Image: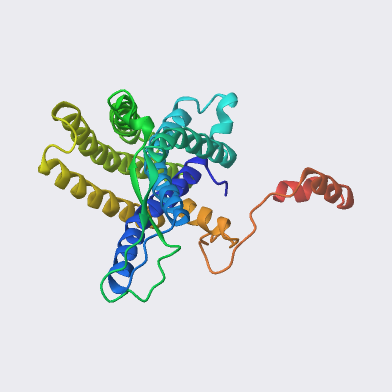
Amino acid sequence: MRTASIYVLLIGVCLSELYSMIIPLKLKFEQFWVTWQKCPVPPSVLQIYFNRIVISTADNTTRLSTWLCVLFALVRVTVFQKMSDNRFQMISAPGFGWILCFMSFVGSFVISLSFYFKDQIEEVGLWTPQPGCESLSTSEIYQYKLVPSDLYTFGNGIFAFLFFLSNGFFSHLLPCILYPLLIAFLLKEIRKPKRIQSGSTINPHQKRNQKTTILVTVVSVFEFLIQMGFSTIFVLELVLGRDTLDSLKFAKIGMRWVFAFNSSIRCFLCVAFSCRYRNTIRRMFGFRDRTPLTGSHKTNSARPSPSLQRSASSILPPCSPKAESSL
């Protein structure tokens, strides 16, 4: 069974969204660890740099999952359009899926660089212990904080506005423009009548392709609804101003919960809906594919090779006319 590129893209989506959902848990755990300690020590410069890299990577993977979902549907549509063209056969190859994942990661990484450089570290001074923690040595413990960088404060925040505009357009608005076109084509393919002759059996390959198309359509519809919510918030922030209404803040929190729920459901949906996706996961971790058998014993229905037929015909004697008429 061949691993199609759309399943590679779908695995990239699941891995990206898994990382994006782990980061809030990491931040909450750090807050709990600080409150649990009796005498918490301020983070060092190395810890602040590490947290900035981790959060910037989460911004990258969130955008990356959106782009991969769009490419997931786009590849399926392209396969339908160019099915008979041999020049586009490489689109279904797994290597093409990894190339798309890498190129999407690089493009999203460039935008996330602006997110990383929005802050800079500033030294506050020597750390002052809390009451009851005076025994700690503070001669070498300095306290640092994050402040807006010079790049983002230059020109009355023009670079901050450009990042906000580009991030909103490429992460939310552009997918909302492409999704309706892709979903309309996929629904058209699903509703096509099946031209099956009377008495003939349904091709299992066609059934698998039909289920794959339904899976791509369902994933695209849910992703389109989520991006519509984020796009609405982005447009309201662009018109009314950022962080001006508390309702927009609560809307962001609600959409993040919806994003987490959709990401969790999508993995179970793909595992339950597609055997090819399950086989792709097994191949990634070195397990064998599970091919369903129609009976208790697997029969070999493959035809013998022409060379074997010729060798058998040379050994067997020719059939007599009487025996031939009896056949």
> Would residue 257 appear left or right of 8 to someone viewing this image?
left
Q: Nearer the viewer, residue 268 or 127?
A: 127
Residue 211 visible in image: no
> From what the image shows, is residue 159 above or below residue 233?
above
Q: Nearer the viewer, residue 117 or 139?
A: 139
Residue at 52% across / 65% down in the picture?
295
> From what the image shows, is residue 140 above or below residue 179?
below
Q: Nearer the viewer, residue 43 or 189?
A: 43
Question: Which color scheme does this rendered protein use?
Answer: rainbow
> From what the image shows, is residue 138 above or below residue 213?
below
Residue 2: x %, y % from top left: 57, 46
Residue 64: x %, y % from top left: 41, 40
> Would residue 77 appear left or right of 234 to someone viewing this image?
right
Residue 55 visible in image: yes
Residue 156: x %, y % from top left: 27, 25
> Please, which residue is most extreme toward the front here?
139
> Would residue 91 appear left or right of 168 to someone viewing this image?
right
Residue at 37% across / 66% down in the picture?
41
